[in-house]
Image: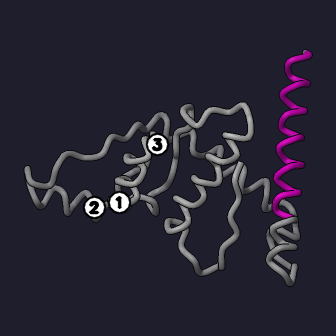
Amino acid sequence: MAVRLTAGQAGDNPQLMALLDDYAATCRDSDQSADDFRLLADKAYSHPSTRTQLRSRRIKHTIPERRDQIDRRKAKGSAGGRPPAFDAEIYALRNTVERGFNRLKQWRGIATRYDKYALTYLGGVLLACAVIHSMALSAVELACLK
């Protein structure tokens, strides 16, 4: 897992490549393989430059196209190129990511950000992530014992 803390008004897309670099570093330190990785993202990450960077890094991704991008591509006709691949079944799994954010926001200090310093807040986020992850692993182990 990789976490980046940004200013509230900062966009998510500019942080994506740095976050993926952080994730790749954690994969090198563990037994996970970055080859098994697939990025599931919402329309905010649908910029053509983002898709180009993901392809150049050979990262599989499922990102829906924004309506304006579809209209612009269709207006160009055959010169607009073909639409990017999109698998709706895989994209439906993205709700697990949203549920993870919702679990994180159940922590009052994370949801309201009372901390004065960013480093303190980041520590709280990482602690909450570790607790949530260990609770999920415990639930899986209990399910296997039944």
Find out whether residue 141 is within the magenta segment: yes
Colouring rule applied to residues: one colour
| SS at badge 2 | helix
Q: CA distance from mark 3 to mark 2?
A: 21 Å
Q: CA distance from mark 1 to mark 3?
A: 20 Å
Residue that appears at 59% across and 53% down: 21
Q: Quadrant of the C terminus?
A: top right
| SS at badge 3 | loop
Give the foreground label among 3 and 2.
Answer: 3
Vertical relation: 32 (above or below) 76: above
Q: What residue does disc 1 label?
A: 66
Q: CA distance from mark 2 to mark 1?
A: 5 Å
Q: Residue furthest top?
A: 146
Q: What residue does disc 3 label?
A: 59
Image location (x, y in percent) of residue 42 = 49, 55
Segment tinted magenta in the rendering = 124-145
Q: Amino acid at mark 1?
A: Arg
Q: Quadrant of residue 101?
A: bottom right
Q: Amino acid at mark 3?
A: Ile
Find out whether residue 9 is within the magenta segment: no
Give the foreground label among 1 and 3.
Answer: 3
Q: In the drawing, does residue 4 fall left or right of residue 69?
A: right
Residue 69 bears which disc, if any? 2
Residue 49 bears which disc, if any? none
Q: Residue furthest bottom?
A: 116
Q: In the drawing, does residue 65 fall left or right of residue 70?
A: right
Residue that appears at 86% across and 65% down: 123
Q: Viewer-proximal residue, 132 or 32?
A: 32
| SS at badge 1 | loop
Which of marks 2 and 3 precedes in the sequence? 3
Q: Are marks 2 and 1 in contact (CB under 8 Å)?
A: yes
